[in-house]
Amino acid sequence: MAETDTFNPSTPGALRAKHGPRWQLEEDFAQNTLDILDSGRNLRKYEAEEAANYAYRVHMSCPLDMIPDALAIREDNLFRDPPAREYEGSKYADLIGKLVADADGEGTSLNRFMRRALWARNSMGVDIVTQMTAAPEGMEIRSKADETNAGLRPFWLQFTALQKVDWATTGSNIYQWVRYSLGEIPAPSEKDGPPGIRQFLTLTPETWTKWAQNIEKQGKDDAEAILVAEGEHDLGIVPAIKFYCGESMVPGEGGVPLSLITRAAVVARCAMNLKSQADMDLLAAVARWVLKGVASDQAPDSLGPLMLWCTESIDADLDVVQGSTQPITEKREWLKMYLDEILRLLKFRGGMGDISGNQASGVKLALEMTDLRNELLSTASEMEAVETEMMRQAVVMATGDKIPKDKNAGEVLGYTVRYNKQFVLDSAADLLEYMKTWFVDLDSVAVNTPMLGKALLERFGNLLIRNDDPDAEQAAIEIEAAADVLMANDVEPTDGDV
């Protein structure tokens, strides 16, 4: 029978309450779909603003930033080729194979699981939690053998920063304990409504606890928690892996993630609000006709182009009144500055960004290769380390074997994973131009640096053919041969070589 407790698991901790609005902003601008825009929560309403004017600004709001594109570019490049995993010789190969095929116990492959984790990491930060499946009701589990016989197995969960309710860390920012929201229990069928119960998961270095709470009671004095289940694990650390772009360095703020878009989302909000003000200025600048010198009962019902109206009044006059467009021009310059800053923060080209456009070609976005490539290489290595630690925790939980958390963990597991490090950040036209410059204009340098020329050819080949393409092996042979010819000291490069 479930026990009750006066403990309130839905109460957010001080750090969650402080940083929650920022994480909500980051989640919003990572997607900024119509429902988010229509909510108006990122568009400030001024105290004296009329409701109709604010509603107009909300209706006209639209995302101008490139934040979703920045997330997609990184995700697509890191998963351009599927991660290469080797574990055939591992004594845990059976278990690892099941985890690779089904990472979350619900049929999600590890590739898809990690791709989703990468998006969450870049947008606000995510914790990857290792758990064991629950024993069937009434079955008593006394040993690891019992767990195996019952078909119990480890699996992983993801919790974004917004799903983390409360936590505590050591001085080294290591979790002492953490509590996550598992969300509302769904309706059991299409004919039934949800039961109105939200669940929570608390983790410590030795235990896990699942709580439930009536949603209507949350935040009230008489709220109580229902202890649903609890258990122990063998890790000796909280089974939660932080997967963040960065972590707050403010003393006492361990476990507070910083994301790829932490700063860019703030600038994007400013840009969206400024654009909405320009919308109102544009509406005010629309030309209006004012009829003077005529009594209101003598004025026509409407006036428009190609209409002729006659009056006997010698005082009648028709003026065109138009608001100034200067505020719109000024706001456009500020908006350009905001968008340039977003590009810089997202590692799109240049110190102040490089965005250009016209009516014919639309917006053209250029990428700064060096910084973005370095970031992607670092992220790929981080993902390899995170996945190896995920496997270590899962194997320890399932078997009870003592596998230390160090650089040799993968060797002990018999498990290695390699993420794609060949990124497509150049267009084919740009790469061809680079190659022409290198092999023709800089031929005297090229013949003495053959490996650099080969790397350039490989980048071009990688742009056209993926590693898992049937023709990839033959392309590699051709690139090797072409590099040998182009870099031979006795061969003069010509335009025809490229």
Image: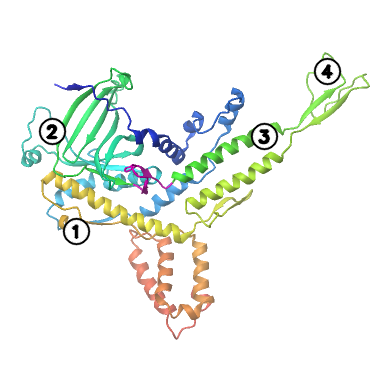
Q: Residue furthest bottom?
A: 490
The mark nearer the N terminus, 1 or 4, is 4
In the rendering, which numbered label is found on residue 299?
4
Amino acid at the residue labelled 1: Asn
**Residue displayed at 53% across by 49% down:** 341
Spatial separation of the CA atoms under disc 1 and disc 4: 89 Å
In the rendering, which numbered label is found on residue 408?
1
The mark nearer the N terminus, 3 or 4, is 3
Spatial separation of the CA atoms under disc 1 and disc 3: 63 Å
Q: Secondary structure at mark 3?
A: helix
Q: Residue under label 2, please give it.
A: 135
Q: Residue furthest top?
A: 297
* Mark 1 burial class by Cα count in 10 Å: few <14, some 14-19, many 20+: few
Spatial separation of the CA atoms under disc 2 and disc 1: 32 Å
Q: Residue under label 3, please give it.
A: 281
Spatial separation of the CA atoms under disc 3 and disc 2: 64 Å
**Residue displayed at 39% across by 37% down:** 19
Q: Position of residue 485 (x, y in %)?
A: 42, 79
Q: Is any part of residue 193 visible from this angle?
A: no
Q: Secondary structure at mark 4?
A: loop
* Mark 2 burial class by Cα count in 10 Å: few <14, some 14-19, many 20+: some
**Label 2 with label 1: CB-CB less than 8 Å:** no
Q: Who is closer to the viewer here, 215 or 475? A: 215
* Mark 3 burial class by Cα count in 10 Å: few <14, some 14-19, many 20+: some
Q: Who is closer to the viewer here, 46 or 136? A: 46
Q: Who is closer to the viewer here, 134 or 20? A: 20
Q: Secondary structure at mark 1?
A: loop
Q: Position of residue 345 (x, y in %)?
A: 48, 51
Residue 315, by quadrant, is top right
Amino acid at the residue labelled 4: Ala
3 or 4: mark nearer the eye: 3
Q: Which segment is the magenta one?
A: 244-260
